[in-house]
Image (spheres, rainbow, N blue to C red):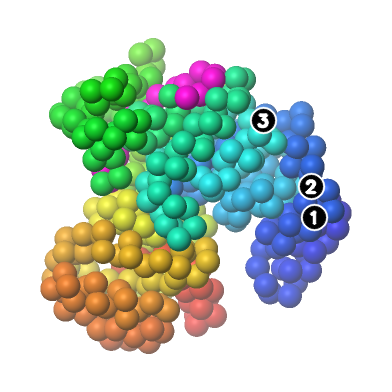
Amino acid sequence: MRAGLAVAKLSRWAGRGSGSIIGGRVTLAMQPDALRRLSAGRRVVLVSGTNGKTTTSHMVAAALRTQGAVAHNSSGSNMADGAVAALAEDRGAGRAVLEVDELHVASVARQSRPVAIVLLNLSRDQLDRASEVRKTAATIGSALAELPDTTVIANADDPMTVWAADQAAGKVVWVAAGAAWREDTLTCPRCGRVMSWSAVGWRCECGLAQPKPDWWLSEDGDDAGLTEAGTEARTDKSATPLSIGLPGQFNRANALMALAAADHERVPAGEAAEAIGRLDNVAGRYSSVTLGARTLRLLLAKNPAGWAATLSMLTPGRPLLIVVNAREADGRDTSWLWDVDFAALGERPLAASGERAADLGVRLSYADLAHHTAPDPLEALTELPEGEVDVVANYTAFYALRRRLGAAR
């Protein structure tokens, strides 16, 4: 463990990153049982899903910190090495909140024996690495079946998530967290029949159906859904005012999932909601950066489901820079661009950038959107009007641009 911490420190000193991946990797190489041993005696909460896990894990960690120290892989290193690094960094914390990549939930859960797993959603992502989403859901479901002492806090509105959580051996807490993206569940994940969707929910002839939620959002006492003002997090026994500093309907849904997790850990709902509400950015996401005469609002979207949520956050007509890479952490396959409803962007000054700017430019052309293309994001920005600019980037493009913006300023 000390060797891993030393290597992580060296990585930071050399400017190679936070060191959380290489530090954990060194520890695991020397002691393959490190995750199980470092988790022992702690109350571990895992947070996973295709979209929203970084934000939700920060929310859960913020809520739990009102009661004491929490170990958290806040940098977003969400495989076993990142979990080991986070636990090693904060050995005195009795609680841990670990963001976990959906492909690694099974292995991390078997070693850390979590008291709760927050399962947000499951949709297509990085198909070159992850294969089809149903396979991922089946693997998670099999792992949950082996954890009788683990509570699963699951999105009741996502059929793929419900199918996975339905296999859990322990208790399931259902949360009405919404499902803006339905293209992966047009057919039932259990039997393959066409799924029936209606105003009251979804169901299949085989019996898989939308569960009654234990937690939901309402406006001014009515079940009016995910709105900005007057929102309450509700259960059959309580109503907690919820006001958050992060934009978008999906972040209110993430906050609801975090509140349910905090409640499981006996954090008073009011204290948890207040702590969650103080977050105004997560690892740079949703933050604003001034560069010369432009103010950039930084957003991250890395797959069709993420874009479905992000589209509603974009200001109509505001200049937009889209940055797309296709490195290992993003997925090498950029075919997901064709599943995004870019036509919904409407007319606005638009730039395509990143290492796969050409792929993105072709997709925007097929959506009949006027745009200019420049692989270098800072160069692409110079062609956009001054003032406020929205920037949407996928994973490696987002963090690379943040570093460059810091240097440019």
Q: Magenta stretch containing residue 233, yes or no?
A: no
- Between residues 14 and 369, which one lies in front from this camera angle? 369
- The vertical placement of 373 against 98, above or below, is below
Q: What element carries label 1?
A: helix
* CA separation in Å, label 3 and label 1: 21 Å
Q: Give, as a three-letter code, the residue at label 3.
A: Arg
Task: Between residue 77 and residue 109, name the one nearer to us.
Answer: 109
Taking the view exactly as shown, the residue that stands out farthest to the top is: 237
Q: Which portion, as a residue range, is magenta?
A: 167-182
- Left or right? Give the position of 131 relative to 358: right
Pointer 3 with pointer 1, Cβ within 8 A? no
Dot 3 surroundings within 10 Å: few (below 14), some, or many (20 or more)?
many
- State the image coordinates of residue 332 (x, y, percent, origin top left): 45, 68
Q: Which mark is residue 29?
A: 1
Q: Is residue 173 magenta?
A: yes
**Numbered circles on residues, count:** 3
**Callout 2 amino acid:** Pro
Tell me the SS state at disc 2. Answer: loop
Residue type, numbered disc 1: Ala
Mark 3, residue position: 113
Residue 288 shows in the view: no
- Tell me the residue that label 2 is attached to: 32
